[in-house]
Image (cartoon, coloured by chain):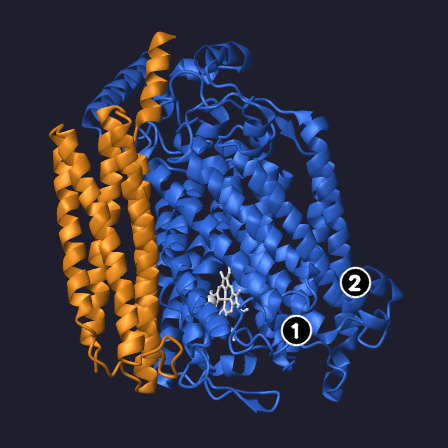
Amino acid sequence: MSSTLAVHGHGAEHHDHGHEHHHHDTFITKYVFSQDHKMIAKQFLITGITMAVIAMILSLLFRIQLAYPDKSFPLLETLLGRFAPGGRLDPEFYLSLVTIHGTIMVFFVLTAGLSGTFSNLLIPLQCGSRDMASPFVNMLSYWFFLTASVIMLASFFVQKGPAGAGWTIYPPLSALPKAMKGSDLGMTLWLISMVCFIGSSLMGGINYVSTVLNMRTKGMDLWKMPLTVWAFFLTAILGILSFPVLVAGVVLLIFDRSFGTSFYLSDIVLAGKVMPFSGGSPILFQHLFWFLGHPEVYIVIMPAMGIASEVIAVNSRKPIFGYHAMVYSLIGITTLSFIVWGHHMFVTGMNPFLGGVFMITTLIIAVPSAVKTFNWLATIWRGNIRFTPAMLFAIGMVSFFISGGVTGIWLGNSALDINLHDTYFVVAHFHLVMGSAAIFGMLAGVYHWYPKLFAGRLMDEKLGYLHFWITFICAYLVFFPMHFMGLDGVPRRYYEMTAFPSFNKWMSVNILITWSAITAGLAQVAFLYNFFSSIWFGKRATQNPWNANTLEWTAPIEHMHGNWPGEIPTVYRWPYDYSKPGHDADFIPQTVPLSETMSSNLPHDFEDNPAGLEQYNAWVKAHKANEAVK
Amino acid sequence: MMAQQVHQEKDRLDLAPKKFVMWLFVFASFMIFAALTSGFIVYAGGHGHALNLRLPDIFIYSTSVIVLSSLTMFMASRSAKRLEFDRQRLFLWLTVALGILFFVLQVYGWYILTYKMGIYFVNPNASQSFIYVFTGVHLLHIVAGIMVLLSALYISYRNRPQAINLYRMEIASIFWHFLDIMWIYLYVFLLLNQN
Ligand code: HEM
Ligand SMILES: [Cu+2]
């Protein structure tokens, strides 16, 4: 195994060719229909980044509307045509913008872009397997995702524009094609796109779970896995359990829309005409949606949590604080997230007793979340911190998670939520705790694992710092004031507030928010430039640029099928042996056996290994004797 | 070098993770049915709309057919393990045939529901629409199941290594038995909610 540590580029590649010669890659099989998990990770990342940029531009468009409701911008008409007649956004198009922004960010960027990239890249590399359980299904997963993305964007090119019922597509608005522009063909495309998306997510998730459970290398028992892998694994389980429920909800919605059934519809009068629907229940949709929807928000944040844990431990040069507690709180969050969905429905006329039950479960989920937060802080505490861009973004993730999580506890109280529901307070809550925190986790991952994604290149640090500070400050400037607007009752998803004189006082705040958002958007240009130019011109990194312990840094810099030439390295220890007292270096990779690190071993390293313990005790004795002689 | 090659080949032939993929897939499908039946409970509970009908007897026949097909599937697997490939193919073909028969019977059930009983899919009492959704989503799975059976058959005619043959058989059995159990679950669920 020490030979695997020493393996570098060339000799290794030679070996590789030896057995790969029957398997020639063409451009198509290498870059397009690739079944290699590392290439698929890159495909997910680049598609995800593209979707993120698009969704960000959409948000800037509607922010401009919110800041300047009375101004007309001729440029908008040039760009958007019939969607912005006279240079002002069409009110129904505003709703479409909000809907597609939310859908793309939640599902396409923070679910597929995040899990798709990092689960694909890191699960095989950190568990020590050659590829996914089923590389073919993995490839399909990406192509379903791309198809879903294309269909979702295509809805901008239909006559009436994209879906407009919000990312939660509540019926009846979403079920009646004639209800408004955004309920027509755009909504149909939304549904088709999401069906593809769910297919993609399930195929990905099933692969991740099977790989983690079946394909770990020798010595890698579950309790030696890095927290990243734990997080991706539990995220995938959440997805497998919850996305099918959305399928059920969407299937019924499609029947209501296109076949005339009444699952969700009742007593509808549309444009003065009484519709034949009767007996349906729109609340049923909310149950089905939020049974997915709440786990979904954890599907978004848990990979970011895993990435932050790893990046923070590596860059604090300290073992992660409370490794077991971290895993158990992830498991706790996974379990609890299935019994809290009702907190999105407190004002649906829910029985107050049931509301109380959901309130209690909701507040309990704050406990594992807090455990994780304190553990991150304790890991950083008195660490030997290296402020790499990745580390800054990971710290930013923790910061946003705290400030957004605190307001979750407000919202979780059913009595408070009556006031706060559907106001900007909710918008502030989830943009901090989910939006910003998860994006920062994702960016931390990109900066940290860039050398693994793009064959040993590094991103530019200076640009990274610039990117971090502008984004961090602007994100707070954008979302923090929204709390106060929400407390004052300003409703979300409104095209303009000009009809309510009491909200006039928020005009200046809205302008501040919009300009902060534009500034944050400009900062992303620095990131995009940095990301794409570094692929070709980035500084070359060494094989293990961050002196990290995990397995992926023992794989050769140049990508190859099967990840490691020769045998896959064996694992002997957990991944967080940083700054272990008694060892000369401040890190001990997982592949170094305890027998090579006698001076730093501790009795509890031999918990289920009595023979090892005996050897260790003998060594300690001998060593003591030696010392005495000296 | 030789050893390495062998080692990697072994990696590639490790079929356990792929089998596990099938289990997870089954689990995900199960969640769809669980969600649909929970939807039914929420709907029927909240509105006092029960099914209010007696399910047509045809479903008893289709149920026996799919149970029988599980049996033939089991026989096919057993024959495959005992290297009796002709019997394996015979039983697989039987399973496929029973699967198709099940499909036909279910569709005939729809015919009876609509034309004989006047219970339509588009219905102000959505509890009754749910019957069509349950059976329809299940039939979609049956179509997929028949394809999996056919692919196992294909492999067995191609004289692939026995390990591959057994693997495909196992994939097919997991899925087919799941479809059988799923239908029994749905049928019992509907029976219990008849009125
Ligand atoms: C401390 C734990 C948390 C609690 C107690 C909590 C509570 C709540 C409550 C009660 C609501 C409903 C507000 C309303 O619509 O009136 C809500 C909305 C939301 N939460 Fe949380 N939350 C927590 C953490 C999170 C996390 C970690 C995420 C995501 C990563 C998240 C994402 C969201 C989203 C996206 C919404 C809004 C959905 C929508 O209506 O569009 N929350 N939260
Ligand atoms: Cu929630």
Q: Nearer the viewer, residue A103 or A279?
A: A279
Q: Position of residue B54 (x, y in %)?
A: 20, 79
Q: Residue at x 67, y 34 (%)?
A: A459
Q: Is residue A597 visible?
A: yes
Q: Residue at x 60, y 62 (%)?
A: A102
What letter labels the chain drawn in orange? B
Q: Position of residue B161 (x, y in %)?
A: 25, 23
Pointer 1 local density, CA inside 10 Å: few below 14, some 14–19, many at least 20: many
The numbered dot on residue A181 is: 1
Identify residue type, mark 2: Leu
Q: Which quadrant holds residue A458? A: top right
The numbered dot on residue A80 is: 2
Q: Residue at x 20, y 41 (%)?
A: B92
Q: Nearer the viewer, residue B31 or A385?
A: B31
Q: Position of residue A42 (x, y in %)?
A: 57, 37
Q: Residue at x 34, y 40 (%)?
A: A210
Q: Label 1, secondary structure: give it.
A: helix
C-alpha gap between disc 1 and disc 2: 16 Å
Q: Position of residue A630 (x, y in %)?
A: 36, 12
Pointer 2 local density, CA inside 10 Å: few below 14, some 14–19, many at least 20: some
> In the figure, is residue A520 to the left or right of A260?
right
Residue sitting at the far front: B115
For disc 1, the chain is A
